[in-house]
Image: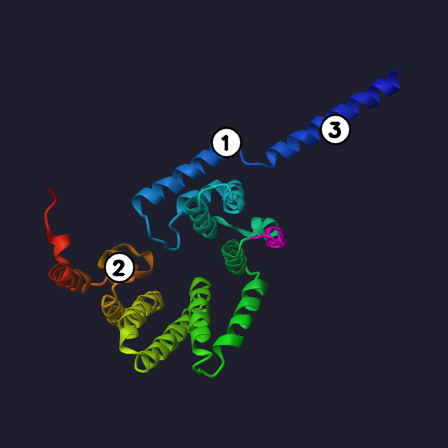
Amino acid sequence: MAILVRVTLLMVLAMVTSTSAVLNAYPDDSIEEQVVAELERVASEQDQVRYRGQYAALIPLGSEAAQVLLKMLQDEDLPLSRRRRAANALHDVAAAEQLVPLQRAMDDLLLEPWVETEIGLILARLGQRRFLERWLKQIRRITDRTPTTVSLAGILEGLSRLGDLQFRSDDLAAATATHRRRIALMQDLIGRVHSGLKEPLTAKMWAIHYNLACCLCRSGDTDGAFEALEKSLRSTTIRLSMAQADGDLKALREDPRWAAWLAQHAKTAEATAPAAEKQPNR
């Protein structure tokens, strides 16, 4: 009987220990609360802006914060805005400890495409580039084709995705070349289309210069970045306020020429603003 009781007690202790280990594998509520608070703070203070290190305040929380962020990213019941912020934060927080859970997440056959892209880019940043390299290879099969009337739309779309992946994986030279090729193809297309299509295509072509400015700025070419940014403001979709907050253009804002450049373009923007925007609130 004594032996049986002892064995039973050992089994109970083993179950308790096992349960404790499982519970401790999940971040506690305080970590999750801190993560949510930081996501909300950034959203309120820096909405529409993304830059490397934006969520650096979460890094000291370590792997537990990364677990929370990965869980948020995969939770389809959460608002999309919260999930995208979690993805951005995970880029800053993820470390080698997250390789296994990130790779396991990629095995989900029902993973949303945008989530797959985010996780693949995080893995590439951690040294696991096989997903990224596969995507780049697939896209180049499209973008390397000779432009024709039939293939041009697909090539332009492919170049857009290619440039984004190259930029986000820090291949700035390749991203710069991709954006320039896209601009050149757009310019050629604008010269060939019906007059009614020229205006929207031109606005889109100028907008690509904003991406180019970000590449050049992060590459240290501030002169080229200023020039590209100035051209991008000709687009109806690019606002001066974007350049004032974008983390990728930080080096421009720290340049001695920035204050004069900003004042000049702020004055131009005011002069060209629609009359409805200039009317005072009543």
Dot 3 crowding, Cα within 10 Å, few <14, some 14–19, many 20+ = few
Q: Of the residues under marks 3 and 1, which one precedes in the sequence?
A: 3
- Report if residue 46 lies within the magenta region: no
Image mark for residue 243:
2
Residue drawn at point x = 37 percent, y = 50 percent: 54
The residue range painted magenta reads 103-111
In which quarter of the view is residue 67 placed?
A: top right
Q: CA distance from mark 2 to mark 3?
A: 59 Å
- Residues 61 and 107: in front is 107
Q: Which residue is mark 3?
A: 14
Mark 2 or 3, nearer chain start: 3
Kindly identify the residue that appears in the image at 37 percent across and 40 percent down. Answer: 40
Taking the image as shown, residue 29 lies to the left or right of residue 205, namely right
Residue closest to the far top? 1
Q: Is residue 281 visible?
A: yes
From what the image shows, is residue 130 above or below residue 143? above
- Residue 82 in picture, x, y percent from top left: 43, 44
Color scheme of the displayed model: rainbow
